[in-house]
Amino acid sequence: MVNKAYQFRLYPTKEQEQLLAKTFGCVRFVYNKMLEERIQIYEKFKDDKEALKKQTFPTPAKYKKEFPWLKEVDSLALANAQLNLQKAFQNVFSGRAGFPKFKNRKAKQSYTTNVVNGNIQLSDGYIKLPKLKWVKFKQHREIPAHHIIKACTITKTKTGKYYVSILTEYEHQPVSKEIQTVVGLDFSMNTLYVDSEGKRANYPRFYRQALEKLAKEQRILSRRKKGSNRWHKQRLKVAKLHEKIANQRKDFLHKESHQLAKLYDCVVIEDLNMKGMSQVLNFGKSVHDNGWGMFTTFLQYKLEEQGKKLIKIDKWFPSSKTCSCCGQVKESLSLSERTFRCECGFESDRDVNAAINIKHEGMKRFAIA
Ligand SMILES: [Zn+2]
């Protein structure tokens, strides 16, 4: 079974907006209540592991007696809040995440609900959701008939737009395609990637302009008095730009990954741990913003859908320092050297040389002739 999510814009009525606001609030309330109780239980039994194991943790059902207004909202949304908290604690114990935090009003306005007995349906520009009934939405693409809807996540953005992300599941057994065309990609901070054929993915000009505009508007925001009317107005402007840029980036990443998955049977990339990398190299936020992680996710499912392959090679492979012609590895190569020159006479753009090495390494490891 394969999962795929589809996101659409929602257009709730005023009454539906009120119920949505209430649901976001109840989910947050229940989450915080359960977190509070869990913390108390841990505090009480932290020195007695055996007793701790026997404790039962709070459930939303328990609060419904005490706070009857919780019954007015989708109970599946509350159940998912419980699951999210459970997951958060599992991540704490496995060392993958820090201790869960309480959600305040500024937290993401969102909840997830599940399909049970036809409670969620799509029909002619409307989606039926628990408690909300039929909500208008813009379905700009069809969900294939063989996809089974599993869950919906409803989100309100900072600028007041509503979205529904519909998670589907479907059976998929693609016939493995014989690999004939292979390409290697070298991650690039500025242009997303450079490929082994010498092509650079370039963010469209309007996207780069929007980024410049964002930087400018953020500077204006930082000069405004926090909490003032003008500050609020500017903050909304910045949030709108953020959303616009995120959408533009996503479109671009979809297009780029679609092209590659169409052109090649196999794509080789370096398995960069972006989080680690941004910390080590102190690139800060820009690496995340670059969208490499999202891009590789898109690329992977687009290739797999067609029985094609994404190969990730580990990140310590010396792709930049190796000569893609003779295989000699250089002792050092400074970041400022944009052209790769080898004693064997080979000369190439530094990133293209790296991309060719990545391609070769992937082919070698996976024995592709
Ligand atoms: Zn060489």
Image: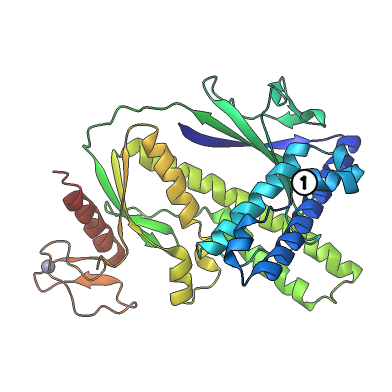
Q: Position of residue 81 (x, y in %)?
A: 71, 48
Q: Position of residue 297 (x, y in %)?
A: 45, 47
Q: Amino acid at mark 1?
A: Pro
Residues packed near mark 1 inside 10 Å, few (<14), some (14 to 19) or many (20 plus): many
352 relative to 103 in the view: left or right: left
Ligand 1 quarter of the rendering: bottom left
Which structural element holds mark 1? Answer: helix
Residue denoted by label 1 = 60
**Which residue appears at 27% of the width and 31% of the height?**
177
Q: Quadrant of the C terminus?
A: top left
142 relative to 323 in the view: left or right: right
Q: Position of residue 176 (x, y in %)?
A: 28, 31
Q: Quadrant of the N terminus?
A: top left
Residue 329 visible to the viewer: yes
Does 305 appear above or below 207?
Answer: above
Q: Position of residue 199 (x, y in %)?
A: 33, 52
Question: In the rendered image, which quarter is residue 136 located in?
Answer: top right
